[in-house]
Image (tube, rainbow, N blue to C red):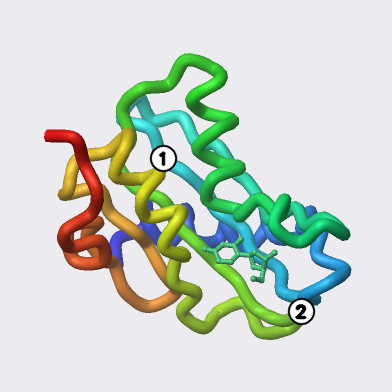
């Protein structure tokens, strides 16, 4: 894996430090690389009303989108229980669908030891087109 994506993954690990996950004890961090080179991080934020939980990936996307970013190259995702943040943590279905809303199908999803394309992890994603 090239250095840019390794560094992006380490930013995702770091972002997980801010995870608010008292219910699952499962920390997730994400680092979203925009085409202009800027990076937005996010973590999962849980709620006592469980369905209100926001995933790390969507936190990162919504931060970037709300700051006017429109073009995205890759997102790194790191998740796990406390001392085990370097096993593959795959984005959930809802986050994949959010990626599809704003990214092309060659958008990259960077995990600890592999890089996947959005086209691989969301075949037949919903679209009005
Ligand atoms: N989680 C994420 O942050 N991203 C995902 O793609 C999957 C799940 C979070 C939500 C919840 O806080 C915890 O992981 C356990 O489901």
Q: Position of residue 76 (x, y in %)?
A: 45, 57
Image location (x, y in percent) of residue 55: 61, 55
Badge 1 crowding class, 10 Å Cα cut-off, few under 14, some 14 to 19, many 20 or more, is many
Q: Quick one: quadrant of the C terminus?
A: top left
Can you say which quadrant of the picture contains the N terminus?
A: bottom left
**Numbered disc 1: secondary structure:** strand
Is 101 on the left-hand or right-hand side of 55? left
Q: Is mark 2 within 8 Å of ligand 1?
A: no
Q: Which residue is mark 2?
A: 82
The picture quadrant for ligand 1 comes to bottom right
Label 2, label 1: how far apart the Cα atoms are = 24 Å
Question: Is residue 11 toward the left or the right of residue 35 in the image?
Answer: right
Residue at the image position 76 percent from the left and 79 percent from the top: 82
Instruction: Give residue 112's quadrant in the image.
Output: bottom left
Q: Is residue 98 above or below residue 22?
A: above
Q: Residues within 10 Å of mark 2 (few under 14, many from 20)?
A: few
Name which of mark 2 and mark 1 comes first in the sequence: 1
Residue 73 versus residue 109 in the image, above or below: above
Query: Residue at coordinates 55% horizontally, 20% vertically from top-left?
Result: 66
- In percent of width and height, residue 16 lies at 69, 60
Q: Which residue is mark 1?
A: 33
Residue 52 spot, x, y in % from top left:
72, 50
Residue 90 occupies quadrant: bottom left
Q: Could you tell me which residue is drawn at 74 percent across and 83 percent down? A: 83
Task: Give the label on residue 126, or none.
Answer: none
Q: Secondary structure at mark 2?
A: loop
Q: Residue at x 50, y 74 (%)?
A: 89
Q: Quadrant of residue 2?
A: bottom left
Q: Relative to 55, say whether 112 is above or below.
A: below
Question: Residue 86 versus residue 109: which sits nearer the camera?
Answer: 109
């Amino acid at each position: 894996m090239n250095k840019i994506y390794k560094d992006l993954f380490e930013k995702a690990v770091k972002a997980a430090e801010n995870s608010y996950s008292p219910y699952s004890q499962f920390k997730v961090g994400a680092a979203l690389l925009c085409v202009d080179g800027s990076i937005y991080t996010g973590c999962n934020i849980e709620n006592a009303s469980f369905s209100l939980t926001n995933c790390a990936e969507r936190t990162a996307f919504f931060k970037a989108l709300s700051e006017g970013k429109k073009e995205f190259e890759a997102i790194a995702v790191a998740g796990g229980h406390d001392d085990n943040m370097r096993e593959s943590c795959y984005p959930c279905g809802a986050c994949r669908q959010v990626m599809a809303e704003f990214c092309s199908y060659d958008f990259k999803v960077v995990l600890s030891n592999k890089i996947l394309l959005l086209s691989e992890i969301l075949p037949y994603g919903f679209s009005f087109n």
